[in-house]
Image (spheres, rainbow, N blue to C red):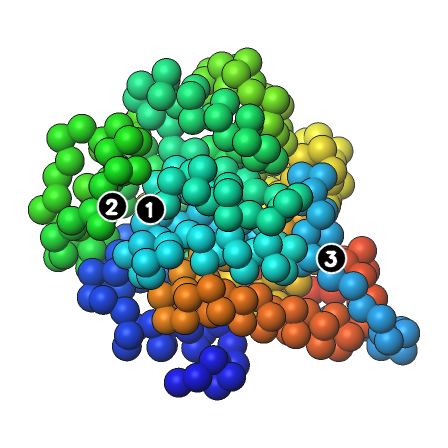
Amino acid sequence: PSLSEVLNLHDFETIARLVMPEKAWAYYSSAADDEITHRENHAAYHRIWFRPRIMRDVTQVDWSTTILGQKSSMPVYISATALGKLGHPDGELNLTRAAGKHGVIQMIPTLASCSFDQIMDAAVPGQTQFFQLYVNKDRAVTKRIVQHAEARGIKGLFITVDAPQLGRREKDMRQKFEAEDPSEVTKAGSDGVDRSQGAARAISSFIDPGLNWDDLKWFKSITKMPIILKGVQCWEDALEAYDRGCAGVVLSNHGGRQLEFSRSGIEVLAEVVDHLKRARKLTFPNEKFQLFVDGGVRRATDVLKAVALGATAVGVGRPFIYAFSAYGTEGVDHALQILHDEFEMNMRLLGAPSLKNVVPEMVDTTHIGSH
Ligand code: FNR
């Protein structure tokens, strides 16, 4: 189908499945075990309903925002997804170019198929980028990666904390993985690569399962970038991250690819906001400690629900990689345009001229958490 026939973010998945190489589809679409958490991620949004307001002037609506002090044209960022070249020869550069055009922030993965510098070089002047870090057992390697990222102007360090070992993704395990471009993968330090059980296994052996709270002090000593923990799943850990000086947390279950029966980020958000309000007197959205959510976000209405509940922004993963797998950079461009169009209409229908007006009273969470 031509791009003009692609009406929403779900469509990219349907089309990508038909046109993508089997191996790429297996790696991108797979999730842990029986994929129940993966399915629930989107389904959780179906349990939250709106309480829109009427008779407000919505001639002008503005859904732009700031994320970690950086301008973003929408409360959405492109979350880190590894191995972009499995889906398209230009890999992550498709995301960089479309993000630059739309003023959206891309989170560059440690395990990108393109080199970090190649991605930075593809950005337009002034384009904001974040970096996702998998912590290497060899901390000298980690230090080098982090300091290089900072030197190149990365504005936020997202440390992935939900993957001491990669989850069991059986669709992917049935494939044998041969890196298209092994340079980055091996540079990341994966010795003794096991190529017999899918891409995830092959690339992840360098990740340090020893990572713990005390390491945060070291990270703060080697970088001035704001540090955000990606993959927090309960209020206790969000509170600890706040107390230890993190700039925020991503409430995420890694797109359902890690611990099966993790709750969806949007459900955890409600719990985290509630406890941080009471225990630390914080209000959300908060400039000093920002809450992010990802997993199953496919519509601007999903995003607006998270914003209403206190999230600064949400991350989107698969839709963008399906978009470039099927259509290259233009696909990602179109996906972002779809989101812009959805924001414009839904902000009007909600009676919210700006994101400041998207408040907790605009959602009905009576049914949240009931499966
Ligand atoms: C991911 N994700 C991920 N996260 C991370 O911290 N480091 C990584 O290398 C990857 N790689 C990766 C690859 C693929 C193919 C997927 C689908 C996901 C997780 C990602 O950042 C995000 O948390 C989820 O993708 C969000 O869920 P949706 O939007 O894909 O439903």
The tag on residue 18 is: none
| Residue at x 90%, y 74% (from the top left corner) | 57
Q: Amino acid at mark 2?
A: Asp
| Residue at x 41%, y 66% (from the top left corner) | 328
Which residue is identified by label 2? 181
Which residue is identified by label 3? 64
| Residue at x 61%, y 59% (from the top left corner) | 101
Instruction: Looking at the picture, tell me which residue is in the foreground, 65 or 44.
Output: 65
Which residue is identified by label 1? 113
Image depth: mark 3 or mark 2 in front:
2
Please tell me whether mark 3 sits on a helix, a strand or a loop: loop
279 left or right of 160 in image: right
Name which of mark 3 and mark 1 comes first in the sequence: 3
Q: Residue 226: tell me if it is visible.
A: yes
Name which of mark 3 and mark 2 comes first in the sequence: 3
Disc 2 + disc 1, Cβ < 8 Å: yes
283 left or right of 110 in image: right
Instruction: Looking at the picture, tell me which residue is in the foreground, 218 or 251.
Output: 218
